[in-house]
Amino acid sequence: MSSPDTAPPARRQTRQRTAVLELLDELDGFRSAQDLHALLRERGDSVGLATVYRALQALVDDGLVDVLRSGEGEAAYRRCSPVHHHHLVCRACGRTVEVADPPVERWAARIAAEHGFADVQHELEVFGTCGSCAAGRG
Amino acid sequence: MSSPDTAPPARRQTRQRTAVLELLDELDGFRSAQDLHALLRERGDSVGLATVYRALQALVDDGLVDVLRSGEGEAAYRRCSPVHHHHLVCRACGRTVEVADPPVERWAARIAAEHGFADVQHELEVFGTCGSCAAGRG
DNA sequence: CATGTGCATGGGAATCATTCTCACACAGCT
DNA sequence: AGCTGTGTGAGAATGATTCCCATGCACATG
């Protein structure tokens, strides 16, 4: 099916793209494109905002980064493992844990089949308050 | 903390809010605020766009309507049952089925507890192509 | 039923994230 | 070193959603 005839994107390695990926590697938790752009500026790795968006989109396409749409419609990005997984996110500090969920996978497939749906795909995110944040203010 | 002393909002019943809710009752599947606004106009129930947004937000707060953020950051609304449930949405025609998922509920709670997360909440949506859409191209 | 008070309305401006435009720069190849 | 096409950047453009604020209407009251 997914034939590799579509030539590989052949991403060109530029200072900007490297900077974005390196920044994501250092951070934990989801960050908005605007946040990342600001962080890059502080660092001195000045990159245009549009370029940050483009780099993030390319990374998402390549499966190196995951996107999460926050409640306000602001997209948040995070460096993630390439295997299918879901997220357990602290709504206070943003700390994120990747989790696998075999049961949910099967459940989704079964429910979809029962209703005659094909080509199934699912999105699952779990939000909560992590231990540190629940304990004290810090 | 969140004490119930905050008096109930005591929503005022207006022609506009009634129109929005009635429209949602007739429709199946998630619709964007802009769509709903356009539909109301066609119907003759002219309502300001800002008012549609306000009415929808109020309905969401009251738990009468569910929101779903589409890939493009455009919010979609749908009249839903007040009990906790998830959605099986056809990505072609938008037809939606409400589904319950006891196993996922438990799984989420357990995973969260294992990682020390409290006050857990989860979001799960399943997307696919429904029978009608998969059958013929139209 | 007449009246008063305040939330609701509407429309256009304001906000904000994201994308587009386009001339110019540079990565990768020869 | 020279070519060529993709990547970049600054600002304009787009589009959804919210804000502002004068006016309107729902609801309680006398």
Image: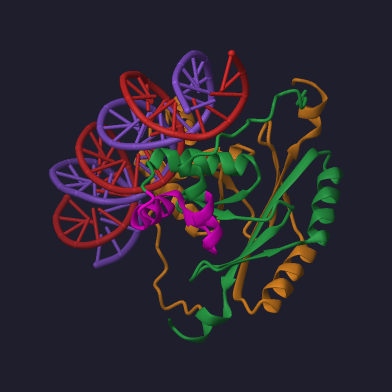
Chain colours: A orange, B green, C purple, D red
The residues colored magenta run B21-45
Q: Position of residue B129 (x, y in %)?
A: 55, 74
Asked if B1 appears above or below A125 in the picture, the reply is: above
List the single residue furthest toward the bottom: B135
**How many discs mark residues in the rendered view?**
0
Q: Position of residue A15 (x, y in %)?
A: 40, 42
The quadrant of the picture occupied by the C terminus of chain A is: top right
Which quadrant of the structure image shows residue B59?
Answer: top right
Q: Nearer the viewer, residue C25 or B87?
A: B87
Q: Is residue A93 visible?
A: yes
Q: Is residue A23 visible?
A: no
As drawn, is A13 to the left or to the right of D26?
Answer: left
As drawn, is A109 to the left or to the right of C30?
Answer: right
The residue sitting at 36% across, 47% down in the picture is B46
Asked if B136 appears above or below A127 in the picture, the reply is: below
The residue sitting at 59% across, 34% down in the picture is B11
Which quadrant of the structure image shows residue D22?
Answer: top left
Q: Position of residue B91 (x, y in %)?
A: 52, 68
The residue sitting at 45% across, 49% down in the picture is B33
Give yes or no for residue A49 being in the magenta stretch: no
Overall secondary structure of the magenta section: helix
Q: Position of residue A96 (x, y in %)?
A: 69, 42
The residue sitting at 50% across, 79% down in the picture is B133
